[in-house]
Amino acid sequence: MDPVTSPESLRRRRSRWSVASALTGLLLTLSIPAAVPSAAESIPDRGDAYMGMGVLAHDGEAATDDASVSVPRATQTEGVDVASYQGEVAWNTLWSSGVRWAYTKAAEGTYYSNPYFEQQYDGSNDVGMIRGAYHFATPDTTGGATQADYFVDHGGGWSKDAKTLPGALDIEWNPYGDACYGKSRTGMVDWIRDFLDRYKARTGRDAVIYTATSWWSDCTGNYAGFGATNPLWVARYASSAGTLPAGWSSYTMWQYTSSGPTVGDHDRFNGSVDKVKSLATG
């Protein structure tokens, strides 16, 4: 596992990766010859991935201020998701702004656990939020069941205490290499199924699937087989959640921006706080 540097250093690394990716895409679009960014500039260190990293680089972000988001706020509950690059999170500030639920990155692959997990996961609970943990999947490193075990063993478990949400599988573009982790569409679906099956065997809960529709279409062939059992957390930085992956007629959660106040990654739960509690209790 690579050593984790200071939050400020991690923020700079995140910024370099996003800027380099956006600039390269722009130059390719304009057909202007350009030097390819070095690996140090364009590829983050293992462990530095976070929810939405690939979504921002590949799908971009449209205007997402409150006035532009088309779903009425009264029908949704505000949430955030955090990872180690954000360091110690100002949970009281987020609570005061109306945030009522949160997910914290617990693990990645089988080689990384979040050094800020305790402050982030317990801190959100301490101010009254309903909280959960997520796992950044790397299907090219180890099997799905193996990563599910690592996730549960490093903070991704569940308890029926009305304040712990089921774990979430963050499956999106690979920030370290091939977008689909070198897997065929069938191979990717099998990997995801292995993760979900093991997670349910360990916790008794169906894990949430976090993804973007464009990635899901490209890398699973828009597989429709998980919609009946696994809640969908869709990522789209625009005024609506847009077309959903096959198998889901509605989303449970929507990551609608990566540039929100206090913590950049903001989300909407498709329902009231009572609905959030219902998901927590199962």
Image (tube, rainbow, N blue to C red):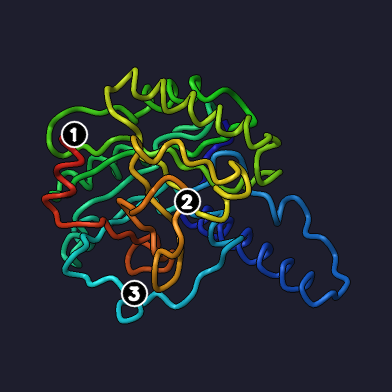
Position of residue 200 relative to residue 11, above or below, is above
Amino acid type at mark 3: Val
Mark 2 and mark 1: Cα distance apart in space: 23 Å
Residue 222 in the image: state x and y as whole percent.
Answer: 55, 46
* Marking on residue 69: 3
Image quadrant in which the C terminus is located: top left
Amino acid type at mark 1: Gly
Secondary structure beneath label 1: loop
* Marking on residue 238: none
Mark 1 and mark 3: Cα distance apart in space: 29 Å
Residue 180 in the image: state x and y as whole percent.
Answer: 65, 42
* Marking on residue 282: 1
Nearer-the-camera pick, 7 or 71: 71
Q: Is residue 26 left or right of residue 198?
A: right
Q: Residue at x 70, y 56 (%)?
A: 41
Position of residue 158 relative to residue 213, above or below, is above
Quickly name the residue at label 2. 245
